[in-house]
Image (tube, grey):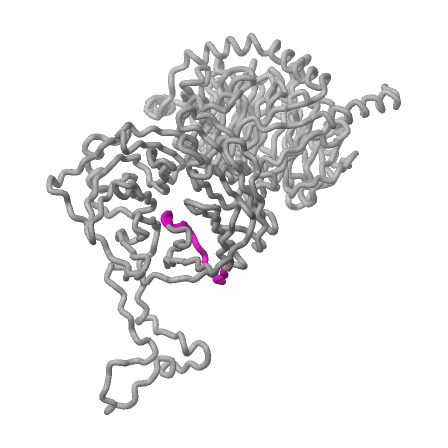
Amino acid sequence: MESDEGNGENNGRRRRRAREAELEMRWVQGFTNRNVGFVNNKTICYPCGNYIVFVGIETKKKTVLKCKNGHVGAFAVNGNSQVVAFSDQKLNPVIYIYTFPGLVKQSEIKGEAQLDYSLLAFSYMGPYLATYSSVPEFALSIWDWQENILLCSKSQPGVKVTSMSFNPMNWHQLCLSNENSLTVWNIERNDQEHHLKSKPVRLPAEDGSPMCKLDVFFSHPGIQDLYYGPVLPISAIAGLAGDEAETFRPKDDIQPSVHPTVHCWSATSDLYMGCEEGHFLAINAETLKASLLYYKPAQDAKERRRTKFRSFPLLCDDSLKKEEDKRRTQKPVLLAMAYHKDGLYAAGSDGIVHFYQIKGTHYQMDDSFDVSEPITSLVFSPDYNTLLVETDKGSVYVYQPSQNEEVIKLLDACNDHFLSADFLTPGNKYCVSIAISGEVHVWLLEDGTLISKLCLNTQATAMGCCPSSCSVAVGTKVGHVYFIDVTKAETPRVVHRVLLSNLPVHHLQYDQSGQYLITGVAEGHIFILDARPSKLFQVLGYLVMSNEVLGLSAVYDVESELVEVMALLCPPDIKRARLEIFCLPTAITIDNDECIDERGMLKNRVIQKRQYELDYPLSSAVRQKDDTVYGYCNHAPFICKYHLAKKKTWKDVSVTLSEKKIPSNQFAPGFLHLSPNSQLLASVAKDGVLFIHDAVTLETVAQEHCHSYQGEGIGSLSFSLDGQFILVNGVDDGTLVCLKWNRTGGDEMKEATDYWRLILTVLNNSIYNENNVLKSMAEWNIATESLLESSLEKESQSTVMLSEWSLPHLPISFCSTSGILVLN
C-alpha cells in the first residue's frame, strides 16, 4: 500500500499536469444551411455551430474563427470591406466584427437587444450595419460599425422579419420582408440626425391580380339611394364598439396577398420579388407599385442550357424523362436571386439556376445549370465574376458566368446532423462519422479532409469502429446492423448486414480486444456478436435486462482475456440506478452451443451476471478494471464515484453508496467517457462544454466550449487510442469538431503513448489477419440478401422452426452453429 506521502506527491504531480493541459481545436466539419457569403473574391465563409468557417475557392483551405460565448447567432459578411459580423446568443447579445484574413476584432457592438438578433446586413458601400432584433423589441437599428455609433432605431412590436438587404446603389434605403409583407425603409438624415421611415408595399392578390383600395368602414359605400335605410358602418352591423370597431373587417372582405419568398435590388434601385404562388414581380421603390412580370419566349424558343449535371441513378430513361418533363411543366417557386450587369440570376424549388433578361413587364429566361436540389441562396463575389449557389441540403457550388465554365461543387455537406464519430483502427490516421440519414463519412484525421462518403439509405441510430479490424458497425432504427469495410478509406463498402430485432438499435460497444460487439436494443435486449470478419460477424447469443438499457461499458483484461460488460439501468419503480454486470468468456466463441439455450439466450452460469443498486439515478456510467465506477447523476449535476464490492449472491440487493461526489457545472443529464488508458474522464451535457477530469482526483484538467445549449449540446464523444485526439459532435448544430492536446505533461503523454503501443502489440496480428478477410468479403447488397433469404426459406421448410422466438420483439435471426435459422 502506498503511503500518504506518496499519494500526496502523485496528487501534486497531477495538479501540475492539470495546469499544463490545454485542448485546441484542430478542425471543424459541418454545414448548417445558413447564410454563405464572399469575404473576398476567392474566399467564402459561413457559420457552423460555435464557429465561422472560411474556405478558399481554389485551394479549399479552411480557416476557423470561434465565437467564445457559444453558438453563432445572426451572421453577415461584406466582401468589399473583407469583414464578417456575427452575434452571440447569450443574454444581452453582443455583435462582433472581425477582419479577414487576419481575424482581428474590429468592433464590438452592444445594442439594446435583450435576447437575440435575427438578422444582420452590411451596406455595400460605407461603414453601415443594419440589425434586427427578435422578441421582445423587434427593432431595426442602423449602426456606423467603424465608429461603434448607433445612428437610428425603430421598433415594430410583433413583426418578424426573414430577409433584410441594403440597396447597393443607395445605403439610405433598405428592404425588409417576411412571409406576408414587404417594406421599404428610408433613412432620412438631417446633419448628424438619422430617422427611419417605413413604406409598406401593396402586394397583389394570390392570383396575381392587383389589390383594389376599398372603403372598409361602411358596408355599402357606393349606394346613394337611402330608400331602404341608412348605410351603416360594418362595425355597427357587427355590434362592435371601441378600438376594435375602427379596424374590424369581415372575413369574406379580406383578400389574401401573395407571400414573398425572396427579393433582390436592381441597378436602377427597383426590386424584384419571388413568392410562394410562383409569381415573379417587379416593384418600383419610389412609387411602391408592384407589377407582375410575364414570360415571353425568345424567337428561337429553344431553351439554352450552358451546363447540366443531373443524376438519377435509380431511374430508367423513361422515368428520368417523365421526371424532367414534370419538373419543367410545374411553376418553380423562386427562393434565391442575385443581380448581375447582364441580367438577373434566380433559382428555387426546381433546382435550376435561371438567367432572366427583363424588359418592361416581360422577361426572357434561359437555364444556366441544374443541381437537382432546391436552391436557397445565390451570391456573387465582390468582382461579380463568381456565383455561389447553396442548396437546402447544404451543398455549395461555384460558377463563373462570364467564362461559362463547368460548375464546381465546393462543399458536399451531409444530408443531416451528425449522430456519432469514432477513430478507425489504429486510431491515428482516419476517423469515421455517421449522420442520422445514414451517410457515412471518412475523414483524414490530420486536417479534416473528406476522403470518401457512403450512403446507407436508412436512418442510423448508433455507430462504432472495431479495434481489431478496419470495419465499422452501424445500427439502424429498424433493428439492422450494417458492417462496413474501410480497409480502403477511399472506397468504403457494406460487406454484411444482420437483422437482430424489429426494435431500434440504441447502443454499439466494442471491447478493447475487438473480439465482441455488444449491441443494446430497445426494451432491455442485449445481443452479443463476434466482431471479427473471419467469423462472419456471427451472433453468439442474447440476454434480457430487467429494464431499458441506458448505457453499456466494456472492460477487457489482457491477462485473462476476459471481457466484462456493464449495463446501466434506471427502473422507474425504485428511482435509483441499477448496474447489471456479466462476463463474456472465450467459451462462447469456441463452444457456442454449450453456452446458449434452445432459444439462443446466453446461460446465466456462463455469463455470471450480477447486480448492483446505487444510491442515485444516473444518466451515464463507465467502469474501470479495478471495479471503480463513475456515474453522472440524473436529477442534479453531480459526478459520483463508486467502488463495487464482490457479490456473493445474485439476490444481494444492498445499496452501494458513492465514495466521492463532485458538483458539475453542466446542465443535466450528461454522459461520461473514459480515455483508453483510463487516466482521464470526460463529461459532456446539454450546455455543449466538454470537461476533462483526472480519473483519480476528479479535478478538472481541461475544458472546451465546442458546442452550445442552443444546439442541444454534445451528442457523442470519442478518444483516439493514442490519447492525442478527441472527436465531439453536436446534437442539433450539424458540427463535428476534432480537438487535440496542445500542451500536456510529458509523463502523461508518455503513459497514453505507451498504452497505445501495448494495445497495438496485442492487436497487430489480429488487425492484419482480419483486414485480409475483410478485403476478400463480397460487397453486400439487397439483391444478394434476397437470394440468400429465399434459399434459407426453402431449407427451413424441412426443419422445425421456432415461432418468432415465443417472445414479443425478440430476434428473428441468429447463428447457424446453434441450430437456429439465420435469415441474414
Q: Is residue 189 above or below residue 109?
A: below
Q: From this viewpoint, is residue 209 visible?
A: yes
Which quadrant holds the C terminus?
top left
Q: Is residue 567 above or below residue 287?
A: above
Residue at the outermost bottom position: 227
Residue at the outermost front position: 191
| Residue ID at (33%, 43%) | 338
Which quadrant holds the N terminus?
top right
Displayed quadrant of residue 790: top left
Left or right of 230, for residue 25: right
Q: Nearer the viewer, residue 101 or 48?
A: 101
Count numbered badges in the picture: 0
Chain part drawn in magenta: 153-169
**Per the image, is 675 magenta?**
no
Image x and y of residue 30, in percent = 48, 33
Left or right of 704, for residue 52: left
| Residue ID at (50%, 46%) | 74
Image x and y of residue 441, in percent = 45, 26
Residue at the outermost left position: 299
| Residue ID at (24%, 59%) | 207
Q: From this viewpoint, is residue 601 visible?
A: no
Image x and y of residue 757, in percent = 63, 12
Displayed quadrant of residue 203: bottom left
Left or right of 354, for residue 41: right
Image x and y of residue 607, in percent = 63, 23
Left or right of 754, for residue 809: left
**Per the image, is 164 magenta?**
yes
